[in-house]
Image: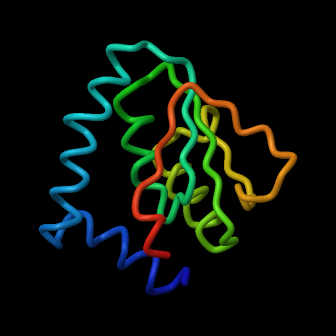
Amino acid sequence: MMGQYLPGLLLSHYFWPHHYNQLQFFRKNYLSKLIESNIPSFMEIGIGTGIYSRATLDLIHNITGIGIDISESSRRFTDYHISKYNHSSRYSTRITDIFDSGHNLNTDALICIEVLEH
């Protein structure tokens, strides 16, 4: 996962038209609404490579976030990815199955992209 799949998935957002267009749509439509709303925090469920969390942190400098996944590989990859953009102080990850009861998953905004097919 860490050596080929996740790096390849990250690169696909720049080289595969579908993922590229999806990321651009996210930036243009979703992030512009978050900027207008001036919300303090977000949560991404199913972080994968962390690219959508990173895009959020890149564009909204006063926001904090948390990433949730059931994959330890995705959590580690995202932590590394986020750290390379110096966003670690505003973002954390955790391993959580959102379908388990007892989790406090309150947030101001939710990001959940390409989770259903998995």
Figure label count = 0
Q: List x then y, in percent, for residue 39.
A: 49, 17
* Quadrant assignment, res 98: bottom right
Image point 45% across, 35% down: which residue? 57
Q: List x then y, in percent, for residue 86.
A: 52, 40
43 to 74, vertically: above or below: above
Relative placement, left or right, of 72 versus 87 is right
User: Could you say which is closer to the camera, residue 52 or residue 81?
Assistant: 52
Q: List x then y, in percent, for residue 111.
A: 47, 44
User: Could you say which is closer to the camera, residue 28 or residue 54?
Assistant: 28
State the colouring used for the structure image: rainbow
Relative placement, left or right, of 79 versus 36 is right
41 to 57, vertically: above or below: above
Image point 56% across, 25% down: which residue? 108
Q: List x then y, in percent, for residue 114.
A: 40, 64
Q: Quadrant of the N terminus?
A: bottom right
Relative placement, left or right, of 11 versus 71 is left
* Quadrant assignment, res 91: top right
User: Could you say which is closer to the camera, residue 10 or residue 47?
Assistant: 47
12 to 94, vertically: above or below: below
In the orientation shown, which residue stands out farthest toward the left?
17
Image point 55% across, 18% down: which residue? 40
In the orientation shown, which residue stands out farthest toward the right?
102
* Quadrant assignment, res 77: bottom right
User: Could you say which is closer to the camera, residue 99 or residue 1?
Assistant: 99
Image point 47% across, 51% down: which residue? 112
